[in-house]
Image: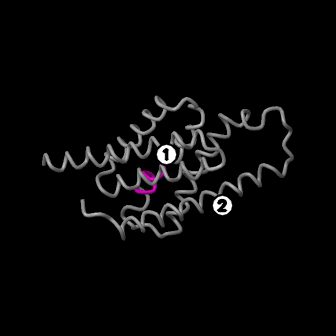
Amino acid sequence: MAKNKTKVIAVSGIMLALSVITLFAATFIPGIELTLFALGSAYVAIILIEFTPGAGWIFYIASVILSFLITPNKAALIPYALFFGVFPIIKYYIEKDRKLPQVAEVILKLVFFNGLFAFGFYLFGEAFTGTIHMPELAFPLIIAGGQVFFLAYDYILTMIIGFYYKRRPKI
């Protein structure tokens, strides 16, 4: 029992350090923020694979809190805190039993994404558009682009998880 707790703490600590470094880099390196947020979400997925959903939630919360404490640009961490960090956990709950058809799983994940997308746009839309008048066609294009981005992200995260399972260390 103590050995298992030690393993959880050690692996989670190492992954937490990697996560914080990745998120810190995401706030400073322009142009690859989304890639680094996606990489940060892979750490959450690894904790879910190795341990329990509870450990995944604790890891996610710890990575958000520690990153907000360390990173000077706190606003840059909002995408990770609201979406990228929590999505692997939501993905786990949707896919864990494989009782649903794959189409239903994708629809549930799209509902989650669109809910967060609408919430984020409602809260932060003014910050992104400011006083710029957006053409009517822009919003459907933004929504369609978001769907494509999300489906690509979900697929890539699935590939990363599959790669990890194949190369999974016996720790």
**Residue in the foreground of this view, choosing between 133 and 70:** 70
Give the magenta-colored segment's residue range.
87-92
Name the amino acid, label 2.
Val
Q: What residue is rendered at 59% in x and 37% in y?
A: 76
Query: In the image, 147: left or right of 106?
Result: right
Residue 124 percent coordinates (x, y): 67, 35
Q: Is residue 26 above or below residue 124?
A: below
Report the mark closest to the observer, 2 or 1. Answer: 1
User: Marks 2/1: CA distance?
Assistant: 24 Å
Q: What residue is rendered at 58% in x and 51% in y?
A: 113
Query: In the image, 98: left or right of 50?
Result: right
Residue 117: in magenta span: no
- Total labels drawn: 2
Say how the picture is coloured. one colour
- Label 2 secondary element: helix
Q: What residue is rendered at 81% in x and 50% in y?
A: 138
**Residue in the foreground of this view, choosing between 171 and 162:** 171
10 Å neighbourhood of mark 2: few (<14), some, or many (≥20)?
A: few
Residue labelled with disc 1: 22
Name the amino acid, label 1.
Thr
Residue labelled with disc 2: 148
Q: Is residue 167 above or below residue 133?
A: below
Q: Quadrant of residue 150?
A: bottom right
Q: Quadrant of residue 155?
A: bottom right
